[in-house]
Amino acid sequence: MINNFEDMQKYSKEHMDLALQTAGNVTKGLQAIASELADFQKKSFEEGTAAVEKIMASKSLDKALEAQTDYVKTSYEAAMTKFTKIGEMYTDLAKDAYKPYEGLFGKAAK
């Protein structure tokens, strides 16, 4: 319970510090996720371009279909791996955003 002005100032400062810490954690997490997505998009574009070149250079329809099948399979596997990693990054982001408030919620429960 807030009894005087000094307690209120201390209480406000603690909450402001928690909010700033959370904002910093969220910012770092979102930057990491954005970087991961940008790297994935760049790699995906490069692999797609190489696959189209390989398909266009194929001498027969069988070789073209084989190249396309290989590309689809590898790109699907890469996407699933990357999306799993990004999902884990979002989970970690949520945990990091909550972490500063764990002590506060513990105090409130008492």
Image (cartoon, rainbow, N blue to C red):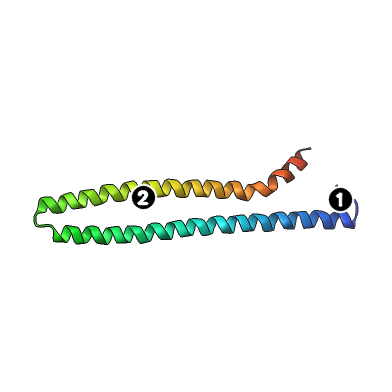
**Residue at 52 percent of width and 49 percent of height:** 90
Q: Quadrant of the C terminus?
A: top right
Residue 69 bears which disc, if any?
none
Is residue 1 shown left or right of residue 20? right
Question: In terms of image quadrants, where is residue 17?
Answer: bottom right
Quarter location, residue 53: bottom left
Residue type at mark 2: give it.
Ala
Residue 87 locus on image (x, y percent): 47, 47
Q: How many marks?
A: 2
State left or right for residue 62 relative to residue 97.
Answer: left
The x and y percentages for residue 12 are: 79, 57
Residue drawn 25% across the image and 52% down it: 71
Q: Is residue 10 above or below residue 88?
A: below
Residue assigned mark 2: 79
In percent of width and height, residue 91 lies at 53, 46
> Residue 40, percent across and down?
39, 57
2 or 1: tag closer to the N-terminus? 1
Q: Which residue is mark 1?
A: 2
User: Looking at numbered disc 1 in the image, what kind of residue is underneath it?
Assistant: Ile
> In the displayed image of the protein, which residue is found farthest to the left?
60
Image point 34% across, 49% down: which residue? Answer: 78
What's the CA distance linking mark 2 and mark 1?
52 Å
Report helix, strand or loop for mark 2: helix
